[in-house]
Image (cartoon, grey):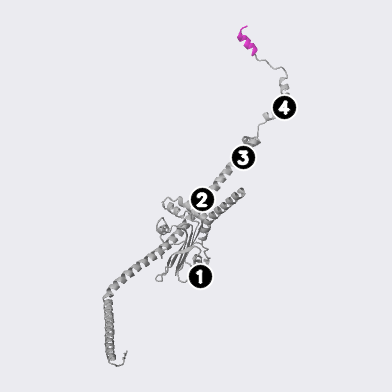
Amino acid sequence: MKRIREGLLKGIGLLIFCLAMAEAPAMAQAAKLQLPNLDHLRDKATEVVDVSLDGALLRLASKALSSDTSGNGAKIQEMIQGLQGVYVKSYEFDKEGQYSKEDVEAIRAQVMGGGWQRVVGVLSKHDGDNVEVYAMNEGNQVTGLAIIAADPKELTIVNIVGPVDLEKLVELGGKLGIPRLEKGKEKKSKKE
Amino acid sequence: MNIDDELKLALKRVEPPSGFAERLMLNIPATTLSRETERPSFWMRLILPFKMHSVRWAAAGVVVFLAAGGLMLRFSEQRREAIETEAAEAAKEQLLLALGVASEKMNVAQRKVTEIGSQGKESESRGETDQNRRAPRIRKRQTSQGNRAASDLFAALHVAAERIERIQAHLNDQRSGDAIYIDN
């Protein structure tokens, strides 16, 4: 009887351990947005940035950063440590109204709930710079970030999966070898 | 006989018995004779250095095979490393681009929030200034409103006093037997 009870307790303990271990990736997976197929915007866009880096590619990038002798590599490496994915889709157009409201709503619907919280929402009628920043929190730590920037001539969606330091991310612009992209002066790669 | 004579006698050249050479040649095998006597051809002389035992050939083959395999492995390893480095560099570039875009958008949001915040402060301070500018007018308006209220109050008090006087008059008349009538 005693042996059965011990076995049962061990089993329950193991189950709890497995559930706890499975929870962390599950939370991280929840932070991954299902980015809609925006291929129809490719032809209309003048500049396209489509970056999709999963865990394996991030580790590879981290390896390349470790050989960066400029000293900035280590800082970026530290920042991306623990990240499970970085996904960016950015389309810049020469005319207004090239993307539809549905394109944005498909993403916005995913961040309306499900653990996401809107950190910043800027709706500027003056210059049309509309930026929404959503974060997924776990305790005091941000475990996911989503940025929806819907300007009249530009649509940008950013999804970072994993622990993100927002302050460090803001500081990255123009530092650490990352060019600060200024509006109208953006140099983006058109990925085919 | 001294030793020198003995040595000379012992080492004296002695002719072989007749037919010795023929008998000897008969005892030597024919193949040995032909091998020794035949001069190898030009081609045989060329191949001769490579003519080895089969085990040696096998050993040499294994060595060559291992060397070639090692070289191929090293080559493929180098190639794999080169591809991996190239992929890592590409991933790094993509990462920097992605972080650049993310950082830019975060900066836009932060700038907008800061702008809105500063505009709010400005409007607040502007509101205070306007209020100060409008204060005399407001005070004047307030004064006139106060005066009007006061005058209304005085009027009401005046009416009330008149009524009280009339009630007292009626009461006096009642004592004298008249009916009481209070009008509005």
Closer to the N terminus: mark 4 or mark 3?
4
Chain of the residue under label 4: B
The answer to which of A30 and A127 lies nearer the viewer is A30
Q: Is residue A98 above or below residue B64?
A: below
Closer to the N terminus: mark 2 or mark 3?
3
Q: Dot 3 surroundings within 10 Å: few (below 14), some, or many (20 or more)? A: few
Closer to the N terminus: mark 2 or mark 4?
4
Residue A86 in picture, x, y percent from top left: 49, 59
Q: CA distance from mark 1 to mark 3?
A: 68 Å
Q: CA distance from mark 2 to mark 3?
A: 30 Å
Q: CA distance from mark 4 to mark 3?
A: 38 Å
The residue indicated by pointer 2 is B82
Residue A4 in picture, x, y percent from top left: 61, 50
The residue indicated by pointer 1 is A102
The quarter of the displayed image where residue B184 is located: bottom left
Q: Which segment is the magenta one?
A: B1-11
Query: Which of the numbered marks, if any, corresponds to residue B62?
Result: 3
Q: Is residue B68 above or below residue A183?
A: above
Which residue: 60% across, 42% down?
B65
Q: Nearer the viewer, mark 4 or mark 1?
A: 1
Chain of the residue under label 2: B
Residue B76 in picture, x, y percent from top left: 55, 48
Numbered disc 2: secondary structure: helix
Q: Quick check: do tags 1 and 3 share a chain?
A: no
Chain of the residue under label 3: B
Q: CA distance from mark 4 to mark 1?
A: 105 Å
The residue indicated by pointer 4 is B29
Q: Amino acid at mark 2?
A: Ala
Q: Amino acid at mark 4?
A: Pro
Whether pointer 1 and pointer 3 mark residues with C-beta atoms closer than 8 Å, the reply is no
